[in-house]
């Protein structure tokens, strides 16, 4: 059985399309999920969003045993959560860190990612379309063909 790719989303991403559309665009989280599922083709996808750091960490723990790869937009937890960093260090497969905006063009508080230290790849600034690009890249990995 093919293991799914987990797409994990952190706080406030449930407000996509409504929250600061001039920064994050008008695409909703439901549209992002559809984009991921389309890009994954027949590959199973676990798509989740939470505003809770605890729940996000629990999902990473679940992924350790169940997922082929993780695409994660940790949102604010990117810059604050050592607990998330520690959980991601345990994941044996590829981890793609994703941000809708180019965090390096934003305020200084967004410039230091704890997640980047354990991520296989980092994507930022592609808007919501970045999810489809990330999923395509994840599915193209030869180590995920099983």
Image (spheres, rainbow, N blue to C red):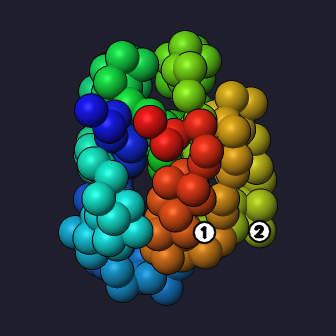
Say which residue label 1 marks: 101
Q: Looking at the image, do the residues carrying marks 2 and 1 touch, with CB atoms under 8 Å apart? A: yes
Mark 1: give few (<14), some (14-19) or many (20+) Cα within 10 Å: some
- Nearest the viewer among 82 and 42 is 42
Coordinates of residue 95 in the picture (x, y in percent): 58, 38
Closest to the observer, 52 or 118: 118
Query: In this figure, what is the number of numbered marks?
Result: 2
**Disc 2 residue crowd, few under 14, some 14–19, many 20+, Cα 10 Å:** few
Location of mark 2 (residue): 105
When asked about the image quadrant of residue 86, the answer is top right
**Which is in the foreground here, disc 2 or disc 1?**
1
Q: Residue at x 61, y 45 (%)?
A: 142
Q: Secondary structure at mark 2?
A: helix
Which residue is rendered at x = 52% and y = 20% of the image? 91
Image quadrant in which the N terminus is located:
top left
Q: Is residue 87 visible?
A: yes
Per the model, the C-alpha gap separating discs 2 and 1 is 8 Å
Which residue occupies the foreground of this view, 45 or 1? 1
Residue 78 visible from this viewpoint: no
Quadrant into which the C terminus falls: top left
Q: Is residue 28 above or below residue 93?
A: below
Question: Quick check: 79 left or right of 2?
Answer: right
Residue at (49, 43) in percent of width and height = 145
């Amino acid at each position: 059985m093919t293991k799914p790719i987990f797409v994990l989303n952190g706080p406030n991403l449930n407000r996509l399309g409504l929250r600061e559309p001039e920064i994050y665009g008008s695409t909703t989280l439901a549209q992002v999920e559809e984009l991921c599922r389309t890009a994954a083709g027949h590959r199973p996808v676990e798509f989740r969003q939470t505003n809770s750091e605890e729940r996000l960490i629990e999902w990473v723990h679940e992924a350790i045993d169940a997922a082929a790869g993780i695409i994660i937009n940790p949102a604010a937890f990117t810059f604050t959560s050592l607990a998330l960093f520690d959980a991601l260090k345990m994941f044996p497969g590829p981890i793609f860190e994703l941000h809708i905006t180019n965090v390096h063009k934003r305020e200084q508080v967004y410039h230091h990612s704890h997640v980047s230290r354990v991520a296989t790849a980092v994507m930022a600034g592609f808007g919501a379309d970045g999810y489809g690009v990330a999923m395509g890249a994840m599915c193209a990995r030869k180590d995920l063909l099983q």
